[in-house]
Amino acid sequence: MPETISINTPLTDEILKDLKTGDSVLISGVIYSARDAAHKRLVELISKGEKLPFEIKGQIVYYVGPTPPGPGMIIGSAGPTSGYRMDAYAPILIAEGLKGMIGKGMRNQKVKEAIKRHRAVYFAATGGAGALISKTIKKTEIVAYEDLGTEAIRRMHVKDFPTIVVNDIYGNDLYLQGKRRYRKTG
Amino acid sequence: MGVREIAAEEITSTIRRLCIEANTILGDEVVEALKKGLEQEESKTGKDIFRQLLDNAKIAKQEGIPLCQDTGMVVVFIEMGQDIHIVHGGLNQSINEGVRQGYRDGYLRASSLDPLVRKNFGDNTPAIIHVEIVPGDKLKLTVVPKGFGGENMSRVVLLTPASGMEGIKEFVLQTVEKAGANPCPPVIVGVGIGGTLEKAAFIAKKSLLRPIGQRHPDHQIAILEQELLDKINRLGIGPQGLGGNVTALDVHIETYPTHIAGLPIVVNLQCNCHRHKEAVL
């Protein structure tokens, strides 16, 4: 049965072995925002053998491009963007030690294989709940690529950030399993 | 009948306001549809997602935080009475100025950029502006901040007439199936059938403006809408694609006469965060 689990980052093998497809997971600690343009730059750095702007081992990357914070706010609306656009880059980051990704939508076979081989997890956050999710982000600072604006890499300190495990270390995929379970057609 | 003058600044200030309101206040019809979805959904995870979306709408409204971080590309539908004369500025110019001000003052995300160079313009202009000239002296402005989760999963096909009704149904179902979780289900499915390539796309998008749950006045089209809605909700995709029986909140179909040789179809998917606000000047 799916469970509700609270975890703290960074992700260790000990934490990852208990996260199973369908579990609700409340994440606390540090996560890093990065989407299309930042991924392109990170992978370029890796291909040139250069150092990444943050230590990626054991970390979670959140696919998000937030709205600007209003007066007195920490961050604006901050829900997930689609993961498939990062499929070209994700296996390279996973091979570097990335252990978690938060986004929405199905990943391709190469990403799923990398997740299983290197023991990582893909979490879904709720697309369309950016205001709600923003309340779980307690502090942010830009780590790199400020010129990218909303696409800059931000270190985010989160408390009980709500997610659901889609792809676990055991090779399961909630997008496939969930659909199969509720399908009433051929 | 005389000509009525409308000042460009009035259009600008109205568009500014509509951009901010559309992005922070979810319409009552959408909130009601989400509540109904919560009741109908069988999956526990799916129910949790409906609750999150309803909470999200409350927080966004109370605190003025955008409902979604993808505050969209701004689509503006204009129905312009033929007896109107816009003074002190151009129509497109005044609309884009309203978008610029709304996105700046509302702390909304600027997403528009050059498609090849891909450098962000920083002010979310230009808007996509559709003008229809209608009888009368009123100006109706409808602002739709269109997120690209749904837009990217939309599809066009130019079917042969032989494909007929079955071809239409198959294409709509395939589009929703292939889209899976990406357009942020529960979605609203806008379908344009007929016309030319761009006409089909236009009526598909415009169909999204019809209130959720309102069937097309043409009986045959209304039946097709209901049939497709039922079939989509049997696909099992569910809220956020995580499995469930509420994949779509509604299906809206619009048609237009087409050519003896053609059957253009466009499916425009709209995310659960179905934002649109209108004003009549």
Image (cartoon, coloured by chain):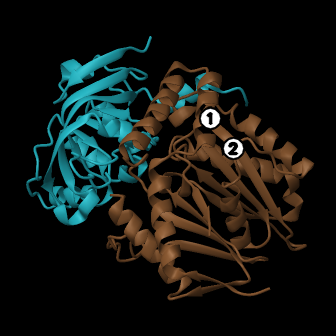
Which residue position holds label 1?
A: B32
Which residue position holds label 2?
A: B212
Above or below A133: residue A170? above
Residue B15 position within the rendered picture, expressed as x and y whole percent measured from the top left: 50, 67
Q: Is residue A66 left or right of residue A145?
A: right
Residue B48 position within the rendered picture, expressed as x and y whole percent measured from the top left: 48, 24
Asked if the residue under mark 1 is in contact with the one under mark 2, i.e. CB atoms within 8 Å, the reply is yes
Task: Say which residue appears at 31% left-offset and 17% top-offset.
Answer: A5
Q: Quadrant of residue B1?
A: bottom right
Task: Say which residue appears at 68% left-offset and 61% top-offset.
Answer: B206
Q: Colour of chain A?
A: cyan
Q: Amino acid at mark 1?
A: Glu
Is residue B120 in sight in this rendering?
yes
Q: Quadrant of the C terminus of chain A?
A: top right
Q: Quick one: A84 or A140, which is closer to the camera?
A: A140
Above or below B94: residue B89? below
Above or below B16: residue B188? above
Mark 1: which secondary structure?
helix
Q: Quadrant of residue A127?
A: top left
Q: Is residue B254 left or right of residue B177?
A: right
